Image (cartoon, rainbow, N blue to C red):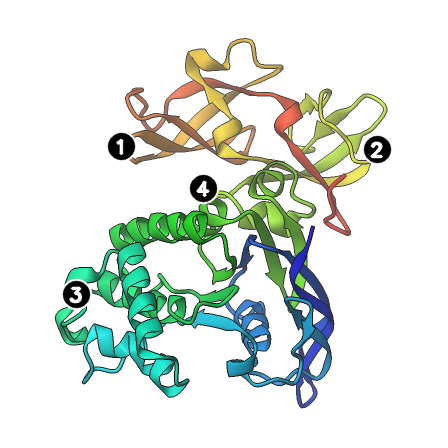
Amino acid sequence: MTHSIEIKELKLSFGAVTVLEDLNLQVGQGEFLVLLGSSGCGKSTLLNCIAGLLDITDGEIHIQGRNVTWEEPSQRGIGMVFQSYALYPQMTVEGNLTFGLKNARVPKDEIAKRIARAAEVLQIEPLLKRKPGALSGGQRQRVAIGRALVRDVDVFLFDEPLSNLDAKLRADLRVEIKRLHQTLKNTMIYVTHDQVEAMTLADRIAIMKGGQIMQLAPPSEIYNRPVNKYVAGFIGSPAMNFMEGQLDSTAQRFDTGRGLDFSVQGYEFASAPTSGPVWLGLRPEHIQSGRWAEGQPVQLEALVDMVEPMGSDTQVWAKVNGQDLRFRMDGQEAVAIGDRMPIGFDPARLSLFDKTTEKRL
């Protein structure tokens, strides 16, 4: 794979506080990479380092094979879209799009060509003569994306561009950004704390915590084979169920010590398993209930504790031998608090983590 962006041993410190340390990352040509994590994990800081908005303490940043570690942002060949639209309110949409190009002394005919192309791709042709105050939030964000687009660069950086929008607009613009990437095939790095955005947009996701990348992999791998308990709990909505207990590697059984004991045969261990304390993870959508539980390798009885109707499905909180479990049911299935129902699951879809290191077994 040809690398569009390569980060080597990057370190960033503010005084005695180290924010990013020994971070290595390679982004392929035309790849859509999402940096995902909770607030304060370092994802926006890393993006700002790539953009040149922060001077790094140590390491190197290469863009398109060129060492840009100490180059100014304008020299790095990037287009950046911020969380805030950052549009000039006194200018029209067309004025906002052309402003940077005029300052860069781009010829007028080239400016017109780029504006026309960006307006067509983003479907903002009717808005060119309007000012930002006359636009909706989604339209303003489209203009902000257009301002990066007209720079005609190889790399686009997005810093939580949809977080100021309502849910429906976020969903609509998410589709537009994915379509934009499929059309342009440029390298894009996208920062978000929203796992739905990450899973739907990314070719690969880098999940960050404490200034380090916990796992870098395609969405399906992160969902199905999280490398540690943190990643497992971060990805998935509703969140993964966790049970604390003991693994008997010889019998391949898991025991909570509170009357809940079942086989984990069928689980694919990353290495030879050893007996000891573990965390067991089970996604709510992997638990079958009612008549669908029949035929599952592990079958248990659940006492319904709380019901959350969601329309297309229903999220159920239940207790199984004193263990809290959350699972999904079809939205048309009848369920009420106090119901007892069979549930079942396939151990092949479990995740097991070492109790001490929290790494996947």
Instruction: Give the mark toward the camera: 1 or 3.
Output: 3
Relative to the observer, which residue lies in front, 26 or 211? 26
Amino acid on which disc 4 is placed: Pro
Residue 19: horizontal and vertical position, in percent?
Answer: 64, 76
10 Å crowding of disc 1: few (<14), some (14-19), many (20+): few
Instruction: Give the mark toward the camera: 3 or 4.
Output: 3
Amino acid on which disc 1 is placed: Gly
Between the C-alphas of marks 1 and 3, the distance is: 37 Å
Q: Which residue is mark 4?
A: 238
Going from N to C along the chain, the mark reached first, 2 or 1, is 2
Q: Which residue is mark 3?
A: 127
Q: Which residue is mark 2?
A: 273
Residue 159: horizontal and vertical position, in percent?
Answer: 45, 68
Question: Where is residue 328, by image quadrant?
Answer: top left
On residue 129, the disc is none
Going from N to C along the chain, the mark reached first, 4 or 2, is 4
Relative to the observer, which residue lies in front, 187 or 317? 187
Horizontal side of residue 338 vs 223, given as left or right: left
Between the C-alphas of marks 2 and 1, the distance is: 41 Å
Inspect this view and state whether residue 125 appears: yes
On residue 311, the disc is 1
